[in-house]
Image (cartoon, rainbow, N blue to C red):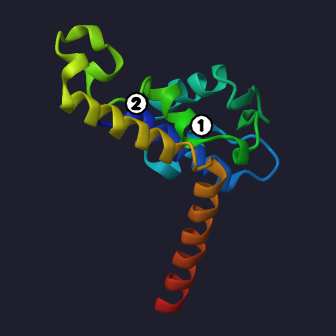
Amino acid sequence: MKISTRTRYGLRALIDLGVYYKGKPIFVKDIAKRQNLSERYLEHIMLTLKKAGILRSAKGGKGGYAFLRDPSEIKIKEIIEILEGTISPTECVEKSKICERSEICVARKLWCNIKEKILEYLDNITLDELIKKQKELNERDKKVIFYEI
């Protein structure tokens, strides 16, 4: 199972939004610039997250994106499922009928267990936790840069 750029960039953009949000929406171009991402590609990702109820947007000079829901209520599992679809290490986990051996396959049971563990792990991490960790890392880096001068 590989996580696509759509999901990786989407998660980075959400973390960035959480780190830099100061009470007013943030422009996609600002997030794209800080994250070194294509603005057009990121806009598509943000629209998907808006349609899913994660973000809200405003147009005009005070436009941009903000969270519709509090990041402490948003699980990483939800973000990945919105952007990636199902999280599954193999196709047979989701579609047992594609293989005649599905019911007697020990390997399939392994893949199902792996999927279960991944989902459990991702369901126990909130977006807010990652935002806080990113803020800590940013603050630590500022201190390092300051002392290096």
Left or right: where 116 falls relative to 57: left
Circle 2 is placed at which residue position?
87
Tell me where residue 6 sits by quadrant. Answer: top left
Q: Is residue 17 left or right of residue 149?
A: right
Q: Is residue 70 left or right of residue 100?
A: right
Q: Nearer the viewer, residue 144 or 134?
A: 134
Specify whether residue 89 is in view: no
Other residues around mark 2 within 10 Å, as few (<14) / some (14–19) / many (≥20): some
Q: Quadrant of the N terminus?
A: top left
Q: Residue 100 location, x and y as percent?
A: 17, 9
The secondary element bearing badge 1 is classed as: helix
Q: Residues within 10 Å of mark 1 (few under 14, many from 20)?
A: many
| Secondary structure type for disc 2 | loop
The quadrant where residue 116 appears: top left
Please state which amino acid type lies under the numbered disc 1.
Answer: Val
Task: Name the residue nearer the viewer: 141 or 115.
Answer: 115
Splitting the image into 4 quarters, where does residue 4 fall?
Answer: top left
Residue for badge 1: 28
Residue at 59 percent of width and 43 percent of height: 14
Q: Are marks 1 and 2 in contact (CB under 8 Å)?
A: no
Query: Which residue does the image show at 42% across and 24% down from the upper left?
Result: 86
Residue 87, position as x, y percentages in the image: 40, 30
Does residue 116 appear in this view? Answer: yes
| Mark nearer the N terminus (1 vs 2) | 1
Q: How many marks?
A: 2
Where's residue 110, x and y in %? 26, 36
In the rendered structure, which amino acid carries the disc numbered 2?
Ile
C-alpha gap between disc 1 and disc 2: 27 Å
